Amino acid sequence: MADRVGGEPLVLGFETSCDETGVGLVRGHTLLADALATSVDEHERFGGVVPEIASRAHLEAMVPTVHRALADAGATIDDVDAVAVTSGPGLTGALLVGVAAAKAYALALGKPLYGVNHLAAHVAVDELQHGPLAEPSIALLVSGGHSSLLLVPDLAQDVQSLGRTVDDAAGEAFDKVARVLGLPFPGGPPIDRAAREGDPAAIAFPRGLTGPRDPVYDFSFSGLKTAVARWVEARQRAGEPVPVADVAASFQEAVADVLTRKAVRACQDHGVDHLVLGGGVAANSRLRALAEERCAAAGIVLRVPSPRLCTDNGAMVAALGSRLVASGVAPSSADLGADSSLPVEVVSRRTTLPPTPRTLGAGL
């Protein structure tokens, strides 16, 4: 049986919003297990995540991943005190697998169920590494599906959207640029590696939505992606070699510049001196370095989880579930469903949302 830490409840977390099957176990701010299965190799030949493949992979991986997490934590399923699951946003089919599994475990164990927001969970995971979150904080979340700036006065029940991507998310742009450069999928790690040998000032790629009349906190990476593709195509038409390292470094610099510039401005505009960086792209070395440099210059405390905790995982869901339990937030109803477009302002699904075309899975 897993040891209790100060009598705090053991929370089992499920994450299946995309292609990662994550199962985590958390007590308070203590991470006991973070088991992960991924179907990324099955999507590589398509150059992106195929929802049907991801959903099937979650079904196959779910029970073995739960068993692995329990074994890693030295716990049994009967030790679990509460269950948390990502109920949105994400791929509908993938979300439904996680929600159905979490509901089954909660029902069988007679334990409370918490349907939580994927983006808020990316913020909560930082508490496992750096302790309680300073409130208010600004959070910059950057992944394949999201580029978001959030104001977090109270992580358990008050998360506000300041800005978001208006087209391609940063991670999506990394994947598409990697394809243009002939690098593997997913594009983030290979671009990061290639950029280390390149000159970030070699090519003046555009910085989207940074003009005086543009939205202050929103992001756009579609134009940058297109600019990279056109630059590469022009070199190829001219019969000239493409300097992959320089292109990767210059593209990466443009992304990191915009993200960190807007995040620091959000902190300054709202009088907040703590910035949390999360999401899969937060593992990028240049983004981390530039965020550290600019936060230090502005007197802002930067909190960045380890790269493993930045990507989608069950630990982040369990961490947010633990925070909700500690804050006395009411659990979700038994007919919890999946909402692929769940707004970040809805930290936890306490009751059933009215039926809409984007709210599926009630009654599973």
Image (cartoon, rainbow, N blue to C red):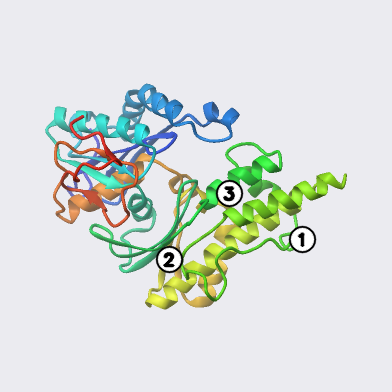
The answer to whether the residue labelled 2 contacts the one labelled 1, judged by CB atoms less than 8 Å apart, is: no
Q: Residue 173 carries which label?
A: 3
Q: Which of marks 3 and 2 is nearer the N terminus?
A: 3
Residue at left 29%, top 57%? 345
Residue 154 picture quarter: bottom left
The answer to whether the residue labelled 3 contacts the one labelled 2, judged by CB atoms less than 8 Å apart, is: no
Residue at left 83%, top 45%? 237
Name the front one of labels 3 and 1: 3
Give the residue type that dot 2 points to. Answer: Leu
Residue 185 picture quarter: top right
Q: The residue tagged with tag 2: helix, strand or loop?
A: strand
Where does residue 83 sit, x and y in percent of width and height?
22, 39
Q: Residue furthest left?
A: 110
Work out which quarter of the rendered image holds the N terminus and state it. Answer: top left
Q: How many marks?
A: 3
Q: How crowded is mark 1: few (under 14 residues within 10 Å), some or many (20 or more)?
A: some
